[in-house]
Amino acid sequence: MKPVISFLLEQLKFLKSLRFRIFMLLMLAGAIPCIIVSESTIVNYRIRALSLKTTEAVNQCRILANHLATANYLDNPHNEISNSEIEQLSSFYDGRIMIVNESFKVIYDSYGLAVGRTMISKEVIDCRRSGSSETAYDKKGRYIELSTPIMGIEGGSAKGVMFASISTDSVLVSMDILRRKAWIIIITASILIFFGAMILARMLVMPFERIANTIASIEQDFGTEQVSIPDYTETESIMEAFYKLMSRMKSLDESRQEFVSNVSHELKTPLASMKVLADSIRGEDNVPIETYREFMDGITEEVDRENEIITDLLSLVKMDKTAGVPNVESTDINGLLDEVINRLKPLAEQKEVSIFCDAQPGIAAEVDRTKLSLALTNLIENGIKYNVPEGWVKVELEADHQFFTLTVSDSGIGIPEEALDHIYERFYRVDESHSNTIDGTGLGLAITRTAVLLHRGAIRASSEEGKGTSFIVRIPLKYAYTLS
């Protein structure tokens, strides 16, 4: 059953086509007014024709009724001249005429069926009472009913009634002829509209097909030449949005390639060093134990460096994957900062660097404790690592009613001005000459910036080469959730 349903859905896929929908709209917009106009014309013709026929028949019946009154026909129903006039009028309208006298007896019937019978009907009574003609239209029988009073010779009230049934077949035949001609016009117009709608739908959809072809023709390098499709404002907007997306994708692809290249380089370097050390040991005989220990210490250092790179990469990847969904909780920022400083004091003592802390008390904020701790650790640790003997690192913490601000300053080697725009790039090292003397993976500031942005915060760096660096981090006290 499912394959059958899938097949049917596949066959009906064209119903979702914009071209098909435009075609159908144009067809309906062209055909429906034609049908409405033709039908309304026919209906108006029927109403007008029946009205004219009724008016004409009423006049003719009144004339005949006056003749009958003058000839005293109600008392002398065998008057041949009057009977001939009645017969002519009945034949002219292809109907039936009956004359009813004062006693409600039928004294004449053009069909010869009701002569001598009593005819008491609402129409006859109303006509005699009002003394004026009464008309009605019988849709089922398709004829017009007329009741015309016949006055006496002396005038006064009506003495009899002429009851006529006028056939409307001639009107209906004319309507059928008119309807056939109208449908011929409708069919001809529909054919023209069909081809016109196909051509117009094709022309209207063509810009979107050009967009699809342009997108399909773009190669893996994301293309370099921008194609403009100015047919509609919408197509221009689509292409502008598309090229913005392509530009971002190109940037992301270049960033990805650069990241993979940097990761490969950073991971290969310790492995190459370990291989060189291992080959050196394996290629020599009777190597002293001290040399073995020295080479093994070198291999251990490279393993530690490899582990540090992998740990930082995992932290960065984990932070990217959880971006937008931090584990936010109310946190004592003062306590968190004290923990980070206490953890880094042994490193500072080893590097002969002093750490000073000036914190405004009682600061609490909604943050992801783990990620913010990692960011603070990276900033303070960098201040220690890239410092000078007997240097200092100063940490300042303050807050207002909306944000808390953390400033980490040091008296270290500083960052060149041209490098400040690149320090948050992954694996970027300000001075490659320090790569072998100062531990680091080049991922610390990238991790820090990601963590700060995750908290809807901002980070800014200022530095003077040879005099030190200062990082300022500003984060909202209340985490700003976004609607998904």
Image: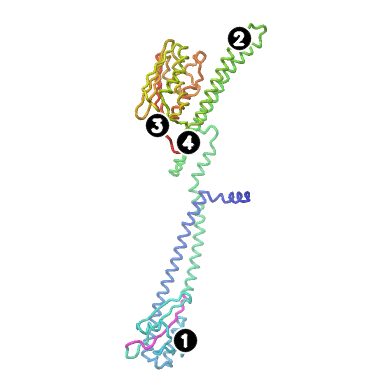
- How far apart marks 3 and 2 lie (CA) works out to 54 Å
Q: Amino acid at mark 1?
A: Ser
- N-terminal of the two: label 4 or label 1? 1
Report the magenta residues as a range. 156-170
Quadrant in the rendering for residue 301: top right
- N-terminal of the two: label 1 or label 2? 1
Tell me whether the residue at label 4 lies in contact with that at label 2, contact meaning CB atoms closer than 8 angstroms: no
- Residue receiving disc 2: 293
Mark 3 or 2: the one toward you:
3
**17 to 307, vertically: above or below:** below
- N-terminal of the two: label 3 or label 2? 2
Decide: few, some or many residues near mark 2? Use Cα within 10 Å; few <14, some 14-19, many ≥20.
few
Label ID, residue 478:
3
- N-terminal of the two: label 3 or label 4? 4
Decide: few, some or many residues near mark 4? Use Cα within 10 Å; few <14, some 14-19, many ≥20.
some
Which element type, helix, strand or loop, lies under badge 4?
A: helix
**243 to 112, vertically: above or below:** above
Label ID, residue 203:
none
- Residue receiving disc 4: 243
- Residue receiving disc 1: 110
- How far apart marks 3 and 4 lie (CA) works out to 36 Å
Q: Position of residue 54 (x, y in %)?
A: 40, 77
Q: Position of residue 267 (x, y in %)?
A: 57, 21
- N-terminal of the two: label 4 or label 2? 4
Which element type, helix, strand or loop, lies under badge 3?
A: loop
Mark 3 or 4: the one toward you:
3
- How far apart marks 4 and 1 lie (CA) works out to 89 Å
Q: Amino acid at mark 4?
A: Tyr
Mark 1 or 2: the one toward you:
2
